[in-house]
Amino acid sequence: MPTPYRSYVSYVALGDSFTEGMCDDLLPDGHYRGWADRVASALAAERAGGESADTGFRYANLAVRGKLIGQIHDEQLAPAVAMGAELVTLAGGFNDVLRPGCDIGAVERQLGRCAAELRATGATVVLFTSTDPTRRLAGSARLLPAILRMKAFVQELGRQDGFAVVDLFSAPCFDDRRLWAEDRLHLSPEGHCRVAEGVLEALGRPAAFDWRAPLPAAAPAGRAERLRADARWLGAHLGPWIGRRLTGRSSGDGRPAKRPELLPYR
């Protein structure tokens, strides 16, 4: 259920590459835009009546690609709590689930602690269920038990006062590879647009479009085209990802958040 409509003057986003905005359009400063920036833009525009004047709306995005839920807890939670924003989005845990031997109970405990501390500030807290990778990625069936358990956990949190959940798992549009970047892990610009609309709907805004609806049908790719795409993906994305796992490195090592302070957003 969406939360009752409320006008927000401040928003902070916590998470990993999903919230950082990986593979969306690039901004002039070299950062990706991402669904969280799109949400901030819509909320700022509400206060301006659709104009570009400064309305006092402030936005911070602490998300960094590659972060595990424990790192989100240790590195992003305290700064976010100190900001005291009226709205918080929290997404994390999928990077943990991708790793063999993931302790899903520990992930739930860390996510639950983050959610509780953020809610204790009085903020509206928006959570997310993961999409279902098994409907588009071969070999991902091993992830499904953990994803389903996390889905149930997040939905239970979302039943509490002050929480809202964006259910990506049940949205059929995310089965379509056109909503995903070439690396098959991060959203395309269309995917980010749809997640942003899902967040705004969860915050009680009237839907601008049906963000869950499938895309128009497209001609299926031929076998040769699929093989070429698979080969590019193996070399450019899966191989380097496995290499980082084997060496204990992360794509976010040493990378700062793109908006570490709660500053005016126009």
Image (cartoon, rainbow, N blue to C red):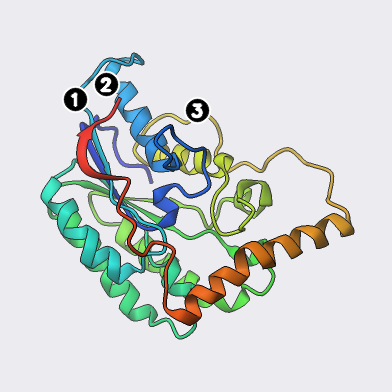
Q: Position of residue 183 (x, y in %)?
A: 61, 58
Q: Residue at x 43, y 32 (%)?
A: 28
Question: Disc 2 on helix, strand or loop?
Answer: helix
| Amino acid type of the residue that numbered disc 3 sits on in the rendered structure | Ala
- The answer to which quarter of the image holds residue 3 is top left
Residue on which disc 2 sits = 47
Task: Judge from the rendering whether residue 208 lies leftward or rightward of residue 108; answer left or right.
Answer: right
Which residue carries the number 1 mark?
56
Q: Where residue 90 appears, x then y in whole percent?
A: 32, 54
Counting from the top left corner in percent of width and height, residue 244 is at 49, 73
The residue under the point 30% across, 51% down is 257
Q: Residues within 10 Å of mark 3 (few under 14, many from 20)?
A: few
Single out the mark in the foreground, 3 or 1. Answer: 1
Dot 3: what SS?
Answer: loop
- Residue 208 got which mark? 3
Q: Nearer the viewer, residue 243 or 62?
A: 243
